[in-house]
Image (spheres, rainbow, N blue to C red):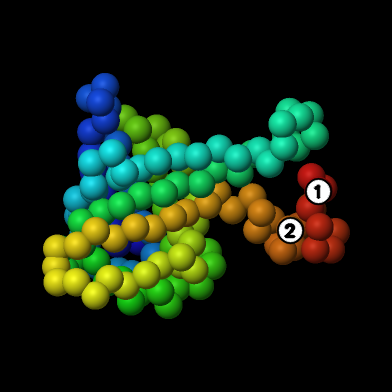
Amino acid sequence: MIKYRIPYKSYDNSDWLIEFDIIGYTGTPINARGVADRVGVLSYDGGVDDLWDNPLVNVSLSSAIYNQGQVDQMEFLTLNDRDCKITVTRNGQVKFQGYLIPDNQQIRLASIPYEMEFGATSGLPLLETLQFSVFGAELGTRCPLN
């Protein structure tokens, strides 16, 4: 279920929303406030300059929020890969969906409120470790795209 929500408006007055879907959470969503100019930055990285060499483009999100005591940062540090799905929507349309990267979290030794940064990835590099099955037939640890 959705644990954290970060609603904000962009320069063109579009409604953006970042949602954190954490496995096992059953309460009501908690709102947080984003840091201006850094609340949601999407980056596209194809890895190479040749468009036809790598058609899968990894998308990453970097963001910063003001933690006013409502965000449990220790929870972010102890999450496993794929335990927290992040969805970014613009005017109700999904623009990004990926997983929180818990590895780059740091706890600031400061009193609240303080800025908290986090990142997420679309998970395309993680596909190599997933089992792929079509119509019940196992193809091993590789998917047909790589």
Calculate the distance from the C-alpha at mark 1 to the C-alpha at mark 2: 8 Å
Q: Residue at x 66, y 38 (%)?
A: 46
Residue 15 horizontal/vertical position (percent): 26, 32
Q: Any mark on residue 72, and which?
A: none
Mark 1 and 2 residues: CB-CB less than 8 Å, in contact? Answer: yes
Judge left or right: residue 41 versus residue 129: left
Q: Amino acid at mark 1?
A: Asn
- The image shows residue 65, relative to residue 81, as above or below, that is above
Q: Amino acid at mark 2?
A: Glu
Task: Give the position of the N terminus as an image quadrant.
Answer: bottom left
Q: State the SS at label 2.
A: helix
Q: Residue at x 40, y 41 (%)?
A: 41
Judge left or right: residue 77 versus residue 13: right
Residue 51 horizontal/vertical position (percent): 73, 28
- The image shows residue 72, relative to residue 32, as above or below, that is below
Residue 127 horizontal/vertical position (percent): 69, 56
| Residue designated by label 1 | 146
Q: Residue at x 40, y 67 (%)?
A: 105
Q: Any mark on residue 128, and which?
A: 2
- The image shows residue 86, relative to residue 93, as above or below, that is below
Q: Residue at x 45, y 73 (%)?
A: 79
Q: Earlier in the sequence, mark 1 or mark 2?
A: 2
